[in-house]
Each structure stands twice: as C-alpha cells, then as structure tokens.
Amino acid sequence: MAYIGNTPAESFASFETETFTVSATTNYTLSHAVANENDIRLVINGVVQQPGSGKAYTASNTTLTLTSATVSGDVMYAVYLGRALQTVNPPSASVGNSQTAPTIITGQTAETSIATDDTILIHDTSASALRKMTRANFVSGVGGVNTPAFSVERNGAQAISDSTRTTVLFNNEFYDSSSAYDTSTGKFTPQTAGKYFITATALLDSDSNSNLKQVFIELYKNSSVMTEAIFDHRSGENSRRITLNLSAVVDMNGSSDFILIQAYIQQSSGGANPQVGDMSTFQAVKIIE
C-alpha cells in the first residue's frame, strides 16, 4: 500500500486491554482515566458495544457505566484506544542481521583494544538505566597494577667481614619497573604506598671447609628487622656453605620506607674469606589490593 510522506510507524502497534471481573452491576472502575466513552472499545460476550449516552455505555475519568447490568458468567473487556503500545518497536526476536545497517557497529567486528576516552555502556541499577562511561573512569579504582616491582641478583661474590652484619649489594638488575632499586646501596625504595611481597635467596660461603658455624640473612624495613632465615651449627659439625631463603609481606608508606637484605657469617676459625655467593637474588612486587 502506497503512502504520501513517511510510512506510518504503527506496523507493530497493539493496544492495552483490561478484563473485568463481572458482577450484577452497571458500574465498573477503569484502570486508566479516559476523557469519555469514545476512548475505549467495550466488548461483552464477544459483542462490541455501542458507546454514548442512551446506548450501551458511557465513561468518564475512571468510571464506566453500563445501560444494562451484567450478569454472572458474562465476559467483558475494554480496549484502550488511546494507549497504543510498542508503536515503533518490532516484536521480540523479529529483527535479524539482514535488517540492520552494516554501520550499526563499526566494522561489525570486536575491538581488540580500547582508548582512554572510548566509552563503555553500563547498567545503573539504582536508576534502572543505561549509562555511558569513559574507559579512564571505568578502570579508575578497579583492580590495580603490581608495580613497582624489581628483581636483582648478586653477579660475582661479595666479600663480607667475619661475624659482621653486612648489607648485600645485589649488583645486577633483571628488571626494575620504576628505577626504585639502588645497586650501590642495596635499597629498594618504591615511592608508591602499598603492601609488597618480598623474597630473597643468599648463598653464604665461609670459603673454607668445616669453617661455617652460624649464618643468617635478615630483611630490614628501614632500621627494623622484619624477618630472618638462620642456619646454626655451633653445637655440631661445621659446614662450608649454605643457601638461605626468606619471604615476607611488608607495608610501605610510599614516601621514605625502604627495604634491604643483610647477611651474617660466623666462622669457626679465622683466615678464610666469607662471602655472599654468586647468583644470590632479591625481588619484590606490589600486591594488588
């Protein structure tokens, strides 16, 4: 059928209806207010009733008045002619790929990356509405990154004095995400507040057979020992070398806190050269909270 102008958008129109619980009365209450009886079509027992004064029924606001009372067993419903529903929306599941324009989703392909100012649709449950939000705002405060982080090793042995706590200088960096580890001081100063998982491994060598009595490594936060690993052979047969491991979670203030590792070697006799051995390691990573 041809039209002058735009094609009407009522192709999928339907009208709200109301079914009444019938009793022996002429008076009923409508769920929706109407201007007059012409705003509804009344059907009783399958027969469309004629509206108007002196005819089958009149209506005003929410009051429906019949000329003749209904009886038990009658079936009566009203169609609200002024309350069209879904006048522009097609029925559910009736639209397929061929009915949508190719540009409805650019390229019709999934994105593999998202820019900071790109927007994401989310559902606001408090308002029962869809909202859009930029990626930058969407990810703000969600999750986090586990940096600063670093991993270093001792490249070549480091000589230390007998029975003296000595800061281990791990002099070879595998990675240091924020340049927070100093190879000259052995300190990790992250400058980012948070909790850090820290591990260290140290090979402690007395440089002489049966000369190792007691050794330990300590994890310092500033000037305080947080944890340590100990090997003590003062009451038994002495050894030459041992590898110690430690780990801890340390809360850092993000401004001045630092951590470092100190080693200690006690020999049973002098003359040897105690040392922290090659490939001893030290690493830390920020925990995502």
Image (tube, helix red, strand yellow):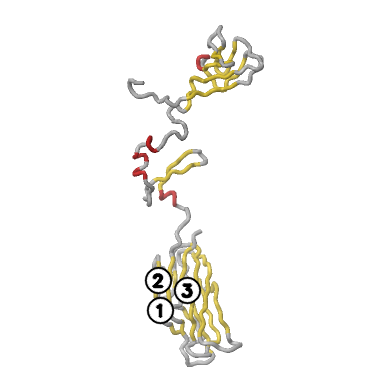
The three-letter amino acid code for the residue at tag 3 is Leu
- Above or below, comparing residue 284 to residue 127 in the picture: below
C-alpha span from label 2 to label 1: 11 Å
Residue 196 point in image, percent of width and height: 49, 65
What residue sits right under mark 3 in the picture? Answer: 260
Residue 140 point in image, percent of width and height: 44, 52
What residue sits right under mark 2 in the picture? Answer: 174
What residue sits right under mark 1 in the picture? Answer: 155
The foreground one among 95 and 77 is 95
- Above or below, comparing residue 284 to residue 135 in the picture: below
Secondary structure at badge 1 equals: loop
Residue 250 point in image, percent of width and height: 52, 67
* Mark 1 Cα-neighbour bin, 10 Å: few <14, some 14–19, many ≥20: some
The foreground one among 109 and 158 is 109
Disc nearer the start of the sequence (3/2) = 2
Disc nearer the start of the sequence (1/3) = 1
Secondary structure at badge 2 equals: strand
Select label 3 or label 2 by which is in front.
2
